[in-house]
Image (cartoon, helix red, strand yellow):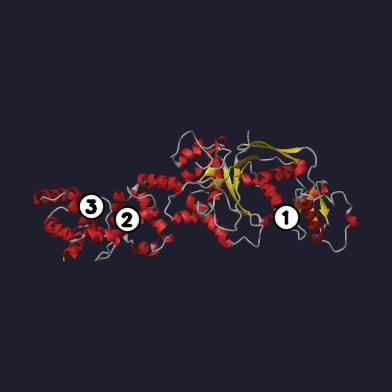
């Protein structure tokens, strides 16, 4: 019986959860869920100077918002330093590591010689076979891994194929610093082994680390996990992803009004594919996701595609669910907390009633908020420039003519209001647009909105008539 699939997401808490990290987490999560396995979370906080509690909180918050749940408690790598030290000393006992007493000055000279001779900068093995009893006094040693010098290290990668790295290209890396702190490659191997990780899915920038880590696994007689190195994300111009392309934290995408379901769908398509499917549910992603579907070439991040996809999700999300997303989004945007505080049950009901019309035009929750502003604006409404132009003498005259018609309408229902206004326009010899445009301006303060009769119904009789009177008086 095969062992259960266990993946892990292992971010460094030195900043926000960036979009590349979010995709890595998504791939680990989707693969584990699809295999009825587990995704573990490890915070790689060994860099104590740069790791912060605020960054840890931002990562956990970002994952939670994206809906990427992990199994068990998040593990702190720093808290496991004693275990990493034990393994370093076990490697010493096995003859797979050694003490190195090189001084900083010697290492600098070594580097300068390599640069002068135009060779790759690598440790030259000075202490690889020397007796520690000959060590200079007062030098605290590091522990270096005794890397194989002949042959090659092979990584059978699900995304990159068979990767072969000559062992002569890998020097003896430090696994324990002179102050006793373990280094990244040792800590990762020990933690992945102890946590039972069966599949490592991470960025292709870790491919060289994979070779070094494989050597440590073999030196400890541990099984090497399956490895998949995912291609990087580039901007639409093919250049390395930068902030102008979208290399932002997940919290920035929340503030820009993207739905977590849409962002999951979009990130899944960056470097992974399932035939020609572009839009799919999270359930379908979990069902379809396979390591074989991950490509080798860099993916391209495109804001326009993300916006269009998000617009699709907004249009197809149930109104009550969309309202919950909208209210959860408000604390993260300018003037959002004030609006949230003002959204009592009555105003929530009004917004819910307006959503079918509002969501047809919105690609983001920011746009949805902007188009919903008319619902909560206080009289007299502020007017944008286009609305002011529509409320010229001709527009105001049209409003004055339709006002008594609306006031006399017994049933404040969109369809009946539409019939009454159309009949009035026909009787007055006006095109419907000549009435609808100034009506829209008076009711919303803008020249664009959902259907004007939906607006009338959602605002209600008293508010609608009051707004029209404000412009006619």
Q: Secondary structure at mark 2?
A: helix
- List x then y, in percent, for residue 360: 32, 47
Asked if residue 261 shows in the view, the reply is no
Q: Which residue is at 72% across, 43% downward?
A: 217
Q: Which residue is mark 3?
A: 452
Distance, label 1 to label 3, CA atoms, is: 66 Å
Q: Which residue is at 80% across, 42% downward?
A: 149
Mark 3 and mark 2 lie on one chain; the one further toward the N terminus is: 2
Distance, label 2 to label 1, CA atoms, is: 54 Å
Determine which of the numbered discs, if any, sits on residue 182 in the image.
1
Q: Secondary structure at mark 1?
A: loop
- List x then y, in percent, for residue 289: 52, 37
Quarter residue 211 falls in = top right
Distance, label 3 to label 2, CA atoms, is: 13 Å
Q: Which residue is mark 2?
A: 371
Image quadrant holding the C terminus, namely bottom left
* Mark 1 nearby-residue class (10 Å; few <14, some 14–19, many ≥20): many
Mark 1 and mark 3 lie on one chain; the one further toward the N terminus is: 1
């Amino acid at each position: 019986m095969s062992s259960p699939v266990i993946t892990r997401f292992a971010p460094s808490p030195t900043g926000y959860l960036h979009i590349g990290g979010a995709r890595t987490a998504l791939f680990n999560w989707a693969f584990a869920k699809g295999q009825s396995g587990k995704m573990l979370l490890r915070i790689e906080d060994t860099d104590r100077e740069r790791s912060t509690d605020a960054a840890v909180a931002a990562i956990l918050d970002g994952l939670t918002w994206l809906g990427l749940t992990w199994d068990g408690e998040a593990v702190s790598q720093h808290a496991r330093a004693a275990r990493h030290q034990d393994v370093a000393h076990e490697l010493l006992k096995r003859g797979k590591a050694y003490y190195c007493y090189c001084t900083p000055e010697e290492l600098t000279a070594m580097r300068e010689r390599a640069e002068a001779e135009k060779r790759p900068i690598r440790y030259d093995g000075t202490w690889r076979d020397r007796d520690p009893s000959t060590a200079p006094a007062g030098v605290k040693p590091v522990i270096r891994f005794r890397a194989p010098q002949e042959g090659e290290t092979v990584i059978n990668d699900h995304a990159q194929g068979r990767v072969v790295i000559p062992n002569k290209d890998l020097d003896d890396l430090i696994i324990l610093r002179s102050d006793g702190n373990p280094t990244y490659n040792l800590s990762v191997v020990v933690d992945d082994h102890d946590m039972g990780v069966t599949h490592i899915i991470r960025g292709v920038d870790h491919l060289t680390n994979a070779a070094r880590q494989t050597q440590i696994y073999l030196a400890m007689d541990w099984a090497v996990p399956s490895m998949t190195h995912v291609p990087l994300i580039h901007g639409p111009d093919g250049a390395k992803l930068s902030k102008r392309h979208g290399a932002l934290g997940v919290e920035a995408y929340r503030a820009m009004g993207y739905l977590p379901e849409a962002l999951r769908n979009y990130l899944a398509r960056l470097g992974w594919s399932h035939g020609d499917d572009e839009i799919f549910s999270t359930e379908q992603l979990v069902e379809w996701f396979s390591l074989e579907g991950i490509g080798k070439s860099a993916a391209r991040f495109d804001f326009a595609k993300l916006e269009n996809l998000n617009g699709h999700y907004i249009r197809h999300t149930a109104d009550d669910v969309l309202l919950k997303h909208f209210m959860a989004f408000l604390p993260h945007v300018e003037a959002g907390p004030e609006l949230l505080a003002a959204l009592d049950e009555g105003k929530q009901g009004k917004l819910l009633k307006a959503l079918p019309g509002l969501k047809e035009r919105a690609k983001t929750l920011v746009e949805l908020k902007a188009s919903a502003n008319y619902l909560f604006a206080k009289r007299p409404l502020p007017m944008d420039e286009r609305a002011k132009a529509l409320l010229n003498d001709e527009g105001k005259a049209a409003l004055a003519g339709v006002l008594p018609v609306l006031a006399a309408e017994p049933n404040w229902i969109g369809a009946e209001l539409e019939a009454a206004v159309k009949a009035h326009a026909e009787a007055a010899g006006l095109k419907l647009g000549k009435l609808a445009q100034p009506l829209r301006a008076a009711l919303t303060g803008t020249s664009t909105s959902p259907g004007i009769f939906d607006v009338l119904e959602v605002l209600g009789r008293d508010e609608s008539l009051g707004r029209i009177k404000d412009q006619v008086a």
